[in-house]
Amino acid sequence: MKLSKRGEYALRALIDLGIASELGWPMLQVSELAAKERLPIKFLEQIFTQLKAAGYVKSRRGKFGGYSLARPMRRIKFGAVIRLIDGPLAPIRCVSKTSYARCSCPDEVHCGLRMLMVDVRNAISTLLDRFTLADIVEITLRKYRRDKVTPPFLHRSTSLGSVLPKKPKKLRGTGGTADFSQFLGARGSQTNNHPAKRQ
């Protein structure tokens, strides 16, 4: 599985909408999201059209319009969004549960490569289907707090301490409190520690 640019932008946009919602801004304009993420507006609009058709976001027209989440963040799983945008999570089609296609192997049942790819598919889908948008938004806000960085979309008159929990919550399915090191691995958390660096 390789996340496409379209899939990456879709996930980043959903995370931004989730963060904004948690900080008191339930609706954002495409231009705001495009500026924050440095993305082309037209491409982002196409992605939102797809997310809207699938029921992940909703829109409102007018001067104060924009996009907002159409369902609770705990009901948006990353695996489902990636499947919507990029298709199956399986690295090869002969192990896909949703888009199976026979490969060129003459003996699929005894194919060692296929056995390995089944395990790869299961590992990827287990992780991506466990984490919800609510989990990742909480992890992101916690990291902003730890690094003493003001989150995007936060009104200047709002105290950062008043909107971010002081104690991390226990996330479902993690066996304890979670942060990016558990989501991405220890190496991932180390590469994301600089607050000013855009990843």
Image: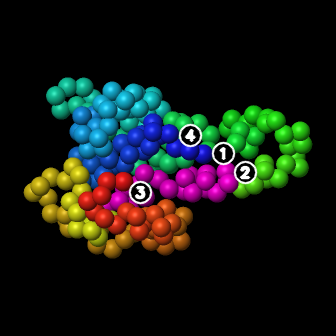
The residue range painted magenta reads: 120-141
For label 1, the crowd category at 10 Å Cα-Cα, with few meaning under 14, some 14 to 19 and many 20 or more, is some
The N terminus appears in which quarter of the rendering?
A: top right
Q: Amino acid at mark 2?
A: Met
> Where is 167 relative to 22, above or below?
below
Mark 1 or mark 4: which comes first in sequence?
4
Residue toward you, 42 or 125: 42
Instruction: Residue at 73% x, 36% y: name it.
Output: 100
Q: Earlier in the sequence, mark 2 or mark 1?
A: 1
Against 163, residue 118 (above or below) is above
Label 4 packing within 10 angstroms: few (<14), some (14-19), many (20+): some
Q: x and y percent of residue 60 in the render?
A: 27, 29
- The residues bearing labels 3 and 4 have C-alpha atoms spaced at a distance of 18 Å
The residue where tag 1 is placed is: 91
Residue located beneath label 4 in the image: 83
Mark 3 or 2, nearer chain start: 2
- Residue bearing mark 3: 136
Q: Which residue is mark 2?
A: 117
